[in-house]
Amino acid sequence: MQAYFIQLSSQLRKHARVLSGTALCAVGVFNVASVVAKPLSDPRTVFAPFNLPDATNVYRSGGGVPGPKYWQNRADYSIKAHIDAAGHQLSGDEVITYTNNSPDALDVVWLQIEQNRYRVDSRSNIAGVTPSETTEGMVLENISEMTGNADQALSYQVSDTRLQVKLSQPILSHQHVKFHVRWHYTIPGTWGGRTAVSKAKDGEIFEMAQWYPRLSVYDDRRGWNTLPYLEQEFFLEYGNFDYSVTVPWNFTVVGSGALLNASEVLTKTERARLAQAALSEQRILIRDLHDIADPLSHRKSGGEATWHFAMQNTRDVSFAASPAFLWDAERINLPPVSPWPGYAKQPRLAMSVYPREGISPHGWDRSTDYVKHAIEYFSAQWFAYPWPNAINVGGYGAGMEYPGIVFDGMHERDPELFWITTHEIGHDWFPMLVGSDERRNAFMDEGFNTFIDAYASDHFNHGEFAPKQDAEFSPQTGNPARDIVPVLTDVHAPTLMMAADDISETYRHSVSYFKGAYGLKLLREQILGPQRFDAAFRRYIAAWAYHHPSPSDFFRIMESEAGEDLGWFWRGWYFSNSAPDYAVKSLQMQKNGFVQVVVANYGSLPLPVHLRLKYADGTTKDCLLPTETWRQESVVTLTLSVEKKVISATLDPDIVIPDIDRSDNTFTVSALRP
């Protein structure tokens, strides 16, 4: 067949050298008429102009950063909570200061009341539920607007897990309203999962999350974001939290943020141990097994105790309480922060609380080391951790994250305990710090976080638990390029852009977690290279810290900062389940030290791909085919300079891209002619 040689531009050669440092293949146009079997890729479709869903405007710029008139509303909370341990009830008295920074006047506010998820008539229970696994949900005792010294009752309407409050008068732009909510609910058992009470040998463990009415987001994209809670995460406003929790005298409480009244709730011994931990690179036991059995190990000897916490610039807070908690801590090597105006700066601690069931040299004895590593590694690699403490709770084991505190299983052991701890702590970056909409865009939450914690597995203790290989990342063979193929070839698999509530449990981990993470890994390692990717990704985190980015914002900032048109990748990986599929069609030695290799592209995701030539003496030579190879043709002839006789050519020899059909990736010369 006829072919003619063409020269690649110097720009394209430079692009390939930046990617891998390997040689760039010379490309020739090939007559495709005789190539049959699978249909070839259509460059006109793959590289067609790609328009992102959200148009740019004064709020969101073409460079993917907040625009000159970007605005965001704010919610500040003051909460007093009380646990009735015997009755398994939590009650709360809450004051919310809501600031309207939008250009709109708001006549209502919407809040999330996720405890209604456990009502027998909730939307989540439409398929039926065991009556013993239901509660009355969130019982609202009072909702009023605070004006001066008086409270004015407000009318409201409950719709499943959402609460609409009608204001006495609209909140004008750049004004705020303060309203008062009093409530209580029955704490679910372990079937509650994310908010639950569970049994341990030394007492019950209360894991309190999604526990108070929380403001919904009002933004420039949709106005009020009011999707019901179907157990697919949250979307929340940022603000400051001042909260206190009253519990029985023998309970230990840990919570998001900083403990402000340690002298009132901790013994002198506990405070001294915490001070020691603030200087220690190894864990210090604050409460040990002896303390669990000793009533004198508590500050009080009867009645109740109130623990006071504060956290600044956060979207949520959670806490855990139990008489069964062992407690250890060690320092985080980051500058101290002030947890609240008027309070002195405090040392920053990685901490764990867990019952005696968690004790093990391969279990919770190592938990705080894992927390410390995650906080310090992610801070150095991506963005500095902004809050005072980071806590791992060993309880029922929902594997769930909230700002500054995560809930894992008391029975977890290595390597699963390392993986889940690192993953949940990683959520402090996505979406606690970068506040994307988890309800709609799960890949910006689970996918982004799984991506960063996979690298944390490589980093910890010289790769003790590497590579990350669990239900969230490369679960079968440990090679993501192989393990993602069943997803890419499954006609029923959802895309990454599908709303979180629309992705069934069958695909939740394989798509939102695994595919979401692996896409970033491909972008970093195969398309942009670590240097360009890391700079762009850090810019994304810094630009959108404490803000609400959309997928379009992320796509734009990565293109703008990395200097690459990635429309073909966004379309193929995020908006569809496209995949690469390359084949070596022929190999022929030429005179004067050249070899010709014919390569075909059948896939609709043209990732850069390496070609490895194997010489007769067993040595090899690699070159790279960049994505631009396929912009006009789907079959190309590579004319390569070689030093020796070539006996085979293999595409993607190290299996780093998800080629869905590897049966034709190698062409071997059957016999060498003299």
Image (cartoon, rainbow, N blue to C red):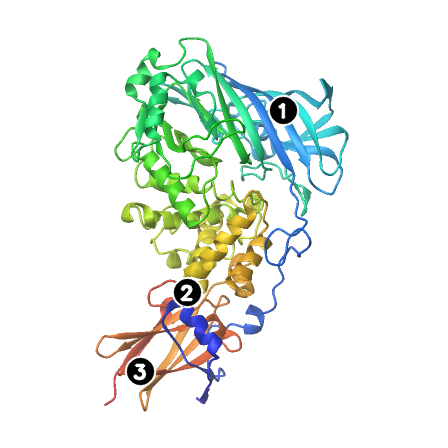
Element carrying mark 2: loop
Q: Which residue is mark 1?
A: 95
Viewer-side residue, 524 vs 518: 524
Element carrying mark 3: loop
Q: Percent from the top left, x then y, of residue 124?
A: 57, 35
Q: Is residue 208 left or right of residue 116?
A: left
Residue that sits furthest to the left in the current view: 617
Given this view, does label 2 or label 1 mark the residue nearer the observer?
1
Question: Disc 2 and disc 1: Cα gap in Å?
Answer: 55 Å
Viewer-side residue, 227 vs 224: 224
The N terminus sits in image quarter: bottom left
Task: Classify mark 2: residues with Cα within 10 Å, few (<14), some (14-19) or many (20+).
Answer: many
Task: Classify mark 1: residues with Cα within 10 Å, few (<14), some (14-19) or many (20+).
Answer: many
Q: Which residue is mark 2?
A: 659
The quarter holding residue 553 reads bottom right
The C terminus sits in image quarter: bottom left
